[in-house]
Image (spheres, coloured by chain):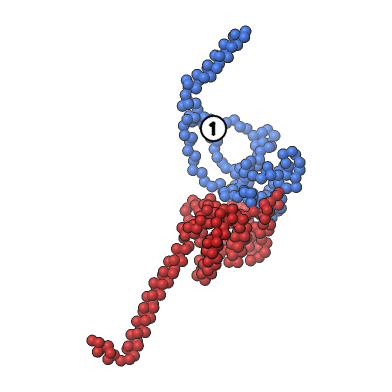
Chain colours: A red, B blue
């Protein structure tokens, strides 16, 4: 038997090695890619997000009162549906940025509600900026405004939506604080909280 | 005379003490036709209020106008007042909403302020969304004649 293999012509042996290696690489690729994706998906679950008490005690509690948490039909948008892009490239970039969040988790930057609220304006603006840059892609994954039925929308919603799109606005330009509490905002209706953001941040008139 | 009054007073007091014993908690009905000791009638499963066509007319002059739209999940906190995002004087022009009334710029001593009075901050304490809820009990309420 062993004599037979040794007697094989050189090209057949090379072919065997090449096919064997590439087959093995292919199988390993499936395993690693599958494993990588599984872990990636696992870090996108609600359970994973609220395993950090920063998320559990602050933003998650606020989100629980909103329509994206529970609603008539039970169709939900969990943390990652809004905060992590679905497309592979942007998702990897977002996951890389998340290492900074991991760092601050261990530094304890926002580990109490007081610390969190002190940073709320900054954190909210970071996320608004990201949403604005991606033209509210995470909203539009579900809410495709090309298919809005303005006849079904309430009057003021239909009017504001059409005005907004005509002016080149994107979802996040108006819909801020829909799933979490807003930071202090100076609305010009009396004394505002110290460090309040100007009202313009809520209604940016700049185009995308 | 004094004696008669004292007797009457004692009689009334005795009667008042006896009534609850005679009737018992089960006999007394609330305005909603339930025994006071009973469980309240279960609320009907109500749906979210969708935007109405326009505000219902007021029934008396001092009535806070009703809200002709849904206010579900509106934030009215120390940080932010969602109602004022449309109804404040600086935003009303852009949104086409009714401007907050002048009466809301007056403090409790009648002094005029340049901004919203703190005691008027919580809109939903007086203004409620309008709905076609049926009255729980019959009543004789009529719209004020001046309206």
Indicate the position of residue B96 as horizontal and vertical percent values. 68, 52
Can the viewer see residue B76? yes
Which of A157 and A142 lies nearest the eye of the viewer? A142
Give the residue displayed 69% in from the left and 44% down from the top. Answer: B118
Which residue lies at the image location 46% right of the left edge and 66% below the top edge? A40
Specify the quadrant of the image occupied by residue A14: bottom left
List the single residue furthest toward the left: A1
* Screen quadrant of the C terminus of chain B: top right
Task: Give how far across and how far down residue A192 sits, in percent.
Answer: 68, 51
Left or right for B78, reference A24: right
Q: How many marks?
A: 1
Looking at the figure, which quarter contains the N terminus of chain B?
A: top right
Residue A67 seen in the figure = no
As displayed, is residue A188 above or below residue A16?
above
* Residue matched to label 1: B137
Q: Outermost residue toward the front?
A: A107
Residue A145 spot, x, y in % from top left:
56, 61
Indicate left or right for B38 with A97 as reference: left
Front position in the image: B140 or B90: B90
How crowded pointer 1 is (Cα within 10 Å; few <14, some 14-19, many 20+) is rated as few
- Nearest to the observer: residue A16 or residue B135: A16
Chain ID at mark 1: B
Residue A190, horizontal then vertical, whole percent: 71, 49
Q: Secondary structure at mark 1?
A: loop
Residue at 68% x, 42% y: name it: B119
The relative height of residue B133 versus residue A177 in the rendered view (above or below) is: above
Q: Residue at x 71, y 52 (%)?
A: A188
């Amino acid at each position: 038997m062993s004599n037979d293999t040794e007697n094989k012509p050189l090209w057949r042996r090379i072919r065997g090695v090449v096919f064997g290696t590439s087959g093995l690489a292919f199988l390993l690729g499936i395993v690693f890619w599958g494993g990588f994706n599984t872990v990636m998906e696992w870090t996108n679950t609600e359970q994973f997000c609220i395993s950090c008490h920063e998320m559990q005690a602050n933003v998650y509690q606020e989100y629980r009162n909103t329509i994206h948490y529970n609603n008539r039909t039970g169709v939900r948008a969990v943390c990652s549906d809004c905060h992590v892009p679905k497309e592979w490239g942007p998702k990897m970039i977002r996951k890389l940025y998340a290492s900074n969040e991991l760092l601050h988790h261990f530094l304890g930057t926002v580990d109490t509600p007081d610390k969190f609220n002190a940073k709320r304006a900054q954190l909210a603006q970071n996320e608004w900026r990201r949403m604005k840059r991606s033209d509210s892609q995470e909203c539009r994954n579900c809410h495709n405004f090309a298919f809005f039925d303005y006849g079904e929308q309430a009057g003021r919603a239909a009017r504001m939506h059409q005005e907004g799109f005509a002016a080149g606005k994107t979802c996040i330009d108006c819909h801020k604080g829909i799933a979490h509490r807003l930071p202090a905002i100076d609305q010009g209706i009396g004394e505002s909280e110290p460090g309040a953001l100007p009202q313009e941040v809520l209604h940016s008139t700049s185009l995308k | 005379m004094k004696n008669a009054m004292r007797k009457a007073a004692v009689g009334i007091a005795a009667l008042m003490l006896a009534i609850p014993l005679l009737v018992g908690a089960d006999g007394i009905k609330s305005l909603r036709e339930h025994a006071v000791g009973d469980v309240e009638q279960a609320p009907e499963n109500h749906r979210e209020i969708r935007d109405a066509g326009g505000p219902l007319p007021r029934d008396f002059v001092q009535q806070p106008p009703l809200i002709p739209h849904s206010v579900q999940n509106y934030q009215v906190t120390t940080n932010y007042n969602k109602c004022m995002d449309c109804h404040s004087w600086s935003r009303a022009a852009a949104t086409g909403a009714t401007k907050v009334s002048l009466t809301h710029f007056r403090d409790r001593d009648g002094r005029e302020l340049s901004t919203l009075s703190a005691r008027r901050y919580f809109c939903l304490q007086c203004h409620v969304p309008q709905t076609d809820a049926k009255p729980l009990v019959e009543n004789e309420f009529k719209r004020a004649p001046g309206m």
